[in-house]
Image: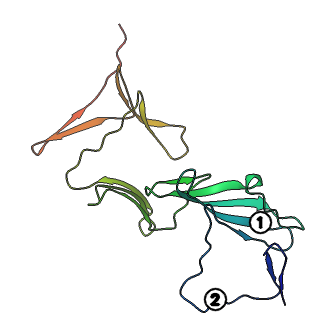
Amino acid sequence: KFKVTNAGDATFAGAVTVESEHLIIKDSSPELYFHTTGSHVNWLVAAQESTNACLEFSAIAADTSLDTDASNYTPVLKLFQSGAATFAGNVSLGDAKELIFGAAPDFKIYHNNTTNVNHISSLLDRQLSLNANIIQLTNQANNSTYLLLNSTGGTFAGNVSVNAAGQKAVLHVKNESN
């Protein structure tokens, strides 16, 4: 069943199949709504050309009717013409997937699910720089500090080994009271 109102709005009952390589929605800021049945989530995909040149994915809790007021939807992802992206929540990657920075790649962060090791690597002899007032390495439970570096010095848990030119030296700290 297909119905067109006097205003030009169309309603389709049943599936709509596009047997072409393109589905074009033409407007200055077109919006495509996905209405789910039951108490799921309704989605809005909107091209925001006039305001910030982005494609915006937004969601709203579903109710019995489709809400076509875009201001009632919460943006969850924005993809900008510049290539930038804004996420409203966490970004999760599956096992053995990498975050890669730069074209070379210059830097990557990943989890190896085979050896269960987390890697942060700076490739191509690049400098890896951590900029913070305090740098602290702790155990997994975050209740024991292995290394603490700050502007007044460094604190190590346990002995410190130094290996220079194949020569190994171990520094031991002895607490003596006067």
User: Pointer 1: what residue?
Assistant: 41
Q: Position of residue 158 (x, y in %)?
A: 37, 35
Q: Earlier in the sequence, mark 2 or mark 1?
A: 2
User: Pointer 2: what residue?
Assistant: 18
Circle 2: element type: loop
Circle 1: element type: strand
Q: On the rendered structure, is 116 left or right of 28? A: left
User: Residue shown at 44%/58% (left/top)?
Assistant: 83
Q: Amino acid at mark 2?
A: Val
Q: Does 160 appear above or below 11?
A: above
How does the figure colour the protein chain or chains? rainbow
Q: Position of residue 2 (x, y in %)?
A: 82, 87
Q: On the rendered structure, is 149 left or right of 167? A: right
Q: Position of residue 177 (x, y in %)?
A: 37, 11
Quadrant assignment, res 170: top left
Crowd around label 2: few <14 · some 14–19 · many ≥20 (10 Å): few
